[in-house]
Structure formats: structure tokens, C-alpha cells
Image: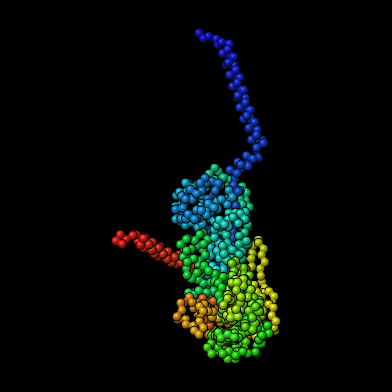
Amino acid sequence: MNKPLAPDADRIFMHRIIIFGLLIIAGLSVLLLRYGYLQVIAHDKYKTQADNNRIKRISVPPSRGYIYDRNGILLADNQPVFTAMLNPDEVDNPERTLTLLAPIFDLTDEDIVNILARLKQSKKNDPVTIKINITDAQLAQFSERQPFFRGVTIESKLTRTYPYDELFAHVIGYVGRINDKESKEIDKERYGGTDLIGKIGIEDFYEDILLGQPGHKAVETDAHGNILRQLDTKAPIAGNDITLSLDYGLQMVAQQQLAGRRGAIVAIDPQTGDVLAFVSNPSYDPNPFISGISFKDYGELRDDLDQPLYNRALQGMYPPGSTIKPFEGMGGLHYGLRTWNSTIFDPGYFSLPGNSHRFRDWKKGGHGTVNLTKSIVMSVDTYYYKLAHEMGIQRLHDWMVRFGFGSATGIDLPNEKAGVMPSPQWKKDTYDKDWLPGETISVSIGQGYFLATPLQIAKATAITANKGYNITPHLLKNSRGAAEIDIIKKPGSKIDYNGQDSDWEKMQETMENVIKQGTGRRIYTSDYRMAGKTGTAQVKSIGQGKSYNKAALDKRHWDHAWFNGFAPVDNPQIALSVLVENGGGGSVVAAPIGRALFDYWIMQRKTAPILPPSDDELKAIKRQKAQDKAEHDAKRDIEDALKAKKEATSAIPNPTA
């Protein structure tokens, strides 16, 4: 039989019940207070956080503007390619993920470093590109392992492509992946969802209008980041399409004429400043730069002795030789030092007063009595030695800069070189030395310190062709799209000239006589009127009393060959400059190239224009190039392996030594 509980035990039990009940009430009160705080006070904060976990705002990149030639031929296209993307908010350890992906997508250590840098710079929800233009084999490998790579997706994205490879590389340039330095400088909102940026050429200069404006989309995702539905969207604004003044056919003729040679050609419409052809040879294929060129391929381009990455037309600074004589001759008229009828006697050399050193004419024995016309037609050096001595270097400088020498032309391309039109102040600033009289004599025939780019020679020739009106060479012909841009359409004001307007016509006739009966007579034709000037610029100096012996010189020490001219004389439609590095004589090598361009532009362009290959032909060409490259790479790898083996063998100590 159970005994009743003692009174003390009852009290203890009741106290425990009461305490336990109070604890329950207190706990419930805390829960209710917390619930009230979450539902009322912190409602907005936690609703936003929940939406952020569920809703993503993703940038939508715009389509980059297309680039066309003057005839509507597409020079820079956009094509869809498979691209591997990494979603930063879904990957816990990006570095480990990229390391595991490296063998699948052929990522180098530098690639991984660059991707990680872009991850740090990117917004939380914006995917970052891992690899552009994934091959079918890479896609298959990744698809097998995709479940192990949460946050890594394959998307179809538009990327740039240049259908004519090296033909327009030095003028259009290329786009490439945004690097770490660029990522810190660009407007991240503007480049949202965009991986590529213009690096050089037109792609760089007109980046702002080609890029477009990004849009965005808000999507709902599940816990694994998969998109469930689209909630909101703002369409991107495509970049402007731009049409260049370049002509595909003339560009092709220029490249074919320079095939196998180092050099540059620039052709300009002297009436408008439109650049019709712009070629630097050798060139390169810009397409590998888009997705990231390999170290081996880039190293091969960089170390090539012929420098295919070097834009000779824009950045190559060369002694212009006799190409400048028509411009300099106009300076003699401007300063009143010469008339068309005044003459000098050329014994084959010139000496400064009180100095026995002889500055030789190219023709031994000289040209006898020479007026301005004959000095240009027969390219008489002595005439310009005397003229420059009388003019003085300062006045010569002040006159030649009016033709654009010593300053950038203002063409719509980045990184243009200004050349050198020397003066006493220039020498003082550059070398901290005084100008010497003999240096004026060298400058007078486009030698010594005088350096010019092929673009500058083409501009000066165009100024002469349009009778003294200044021009700004430009490539942009028109632009279509949301962005507005000013386009240069006409030449500027006439350069300051203190002579008769008829002097320009007389100089044009004189340059025509160069072709009819002078140093350019090899290329004369009766089909149309052509004016020009040949030039041969010394690369290696020749000692006093010695003659030029081409056979005894290394080929890279041969003279540069120049030709500049315009046609037709009565209504100039094209002015050009041709440079062939170490080509020898301008009349023999460069002038026929100029004639080929004149022939196409004046006689063939409208009746039988050169057109691009068909799509099937283009594919066949690209297949052949890919095959040639594969064979080249295989040969290079074998050579590298043999070289490495030889080096390793030579490093082993000889035990008998």
C-alpha cells in the first residue's frame, strides 16, 4: 500500500512544476518576440536576402557592331560559339574548380590566374568566362563530368571572327579577353556580361560605339542554381555597325603586290581623305587572339625576324628619300628662293662653303644645268642640297610640317607614330647638341634625322594632288546605330602658301613628267594620266669616295624602295605611297606596285571588281590553313623536343673528362 507524499515533497514538486511552467512561458515569449521581430521589424531585410537567394539579376551582353568595307563586304563578324562559364555565387572554391577543369579546357596557369582576377572584379551574379570557343571534344569531356562541377555551365555566346584573316589585321585589329589591368579601368556596368574588348586598330579606336549597351534579366533559381523562370528583362542595345572607307579589292591588290616582301601601302582619296587601302606586310591572323593565343604561337609571331605584328604603315618610321622633293620644291617657291625657270649647275656634287667634303648626286658627273622641273623629273640631289642650304633647316622644317611631317596625321587608329621632321630645337631637346650645317644637306634628300611613315607620305601626296588643301586621313565612312559620332567628310583649309595657285598645277604636271620621261618612266601608260615620284632611301651609310655595292651588302642593309603618286592627274581619285623595305631602287621595285594599284582603281574596279571568295571557297581556304598550321605545329614540336633533348644531353657531365 502506497504511502501519501510528505508535505515537503509536495511543495518541492509544485515549485518544480511552477518553475518549469515559467520557463515554458518565457521560452514561448522569446519565440513570439523573435517571430514578431522577424515578421514586422526585420521583414524587409530578410525578404530581400531570401529573394537574393532565389532571384538573380544577370547582365545580358549586347551584340558587338559589325564592320564592313565601303561596298558592304563584312570584315568583322559575330558568330555563336560554345563558351564555358563559371557562376561565382555557386562555386565555393573557384581555384580548385579551375584546376580540375584545366585538363578539360587546356587552361594554363596564367589562364587560371587571369580568371581568378576577373572573378574578384566581377559582380556577384555575373558569370565569368572560363573558355571561349570550346571544341566538340572539350564539350564531350565536360558533359561527362558536369555533375561534379556545380556552378559551371556551357552557353552559346556570340564572339568576334575575322573572315579574311590577315588581309585587314593591321587596320581592323582584333578584340581579346579583358585582362586584369583593363578590368580595373573599365566601367563594369557597361561591360556587364561582356568578355571581349577592342585591343588594337579600329576595334580599339571605336570600342565605345562598337560595344553597345548591356541589358539584364531577373531569373528565379532553385537551390542548385538552375533557372526556374524568367521574371524580368531589359534588352541590350547592340553596338553600332560601321562602314569603313577601305575597298576589299584594292586591299587585296596591295597585299598581293607585297607578297613575300616587307613593306607598306597606303592609298587615300585626296578629295575626301577616305583611306582606300591600308596594308602592312607581313601580316598575321587576328582570330587566335580572340579566345587567347597560345604562348608558342605568340612567341613565334613576336620573335619572327620579319615582325608580322609591326604595323609598318602606321608606326614604321623610315627615311623618306626623294619622295619629298616635290614638297620641298614648293617650299623653294614659297620662300622666293627659286622660280620655275631659275637654274643651278650640277657637277655631280655639292660642298658647303669652306668645306671640302662632297655631298654626291646619285648620278656621277651630275646633270648639268637644272631647273625645278628637271630636279624632280630626274631626281637631282644637288639641286636640293643647294636649296636646303639657302633655305636653312629652320625654314625647311617650318615648311615641311605644313604637309604633316613631324606630327601624327590624326587618322582614326591608335598608336600612330609622328615621325621626325628635325629642327635645331629638336636636336637640342633630343641629343643636347647644336645643329650642324651638313645635317641640313642630309635632311634635304630625306635622309639623316628625317623620318616619316608611309601614311605621312600618302597624306603629303594627297595634299599635292588636291592643290594644297590639307586632309585628315580617316577610315570611318559611316555608322549606323544608337551611338552618335562625327565623321570627317571633306578636306580642311588650304595650307599657307606664298606663291601662285598655278604652282600646284605646275607641280602636278612635273610629277606627271616623272612618269612620262623621268625616273618613273618604266610604269608609263597612255590609258590615263599618272603623276608620281620615286625614291630610294639609304639604310647603310656609304663612306666618302666609295660607291654603293648592293651585292656586297646583307639583304637587310639594302636601300628602301619608295614610290608616291596620284591619278588621274586632271581629276585625282587616288593618292598613295608604297614602301618596300630593303627593296633596292624605287623606280624598279616600288613604282610598278603603285602602277598596279592605279590600274585597279581607275580601270578595273567598276567593270571587274575583285570580290571575296564564296562561303564554300572560304571554308576550303580555312581548312587548308588549319591543316598547314597543324603540320607546322607538329614540325615545331618535334624540333623543340630534339632541341630540349640535345640540351639535356649536353648538360650531362662526361665521366671521362
Q: Could you tell me which residue is drawn at 62 percent across and 49 percent down?
A: 232
- Residue farthest to the top, as pictured: 1
- Residue farthest to the left, as pictured: 656
Q: Which quadrant holds the C terminus?
A: bottom left
Q: Could you tell me which residue is drawn at 64 percent across and 64 percent down?
A: 480
- Number of numbered tags placed on the structure image: 0
Q: Nearer the viewer, residue 419 or 584?
A: 419
Which colour assignment does the render follow?
rainbow
Q: Could you tell me which residue is drawn at 54 percent across and 42 percent down?
A: 223
Q: Nearer the viewer, residue 624 or 98?
A: 98
- Residue farthest to the bottom, as pictured: 369
Q: Position of residue 590 (x, y in %)?
A: 53, 79
In the shown orientation, is residue 634 left or right of residue 151? left
Q: Position of residue 312 (x, y in %)?
A: 54, 71
Above or below 331: residue 164: above
Q: Could you tell me which residue is drawn at 47 percent across and 50 percent down?
A: 99
Q: Nearer the viewer, residue 404 or 603?
A: 404
Above or below 225: residue 347: below
Above or below 126: residue 241: below
Residue 533 visible somewhere in the drawing: yes
In the shown orientation, is residue 161 left or right of residue 653? right
Q: Position of residue 427 (x, y in %)?
A: 61, 73
Above or below 491: residue 154: above
Residue 267 visible somewhere in the drawing: no
Q: Position of residue 47 (x, y in %)?
A: 63, 40
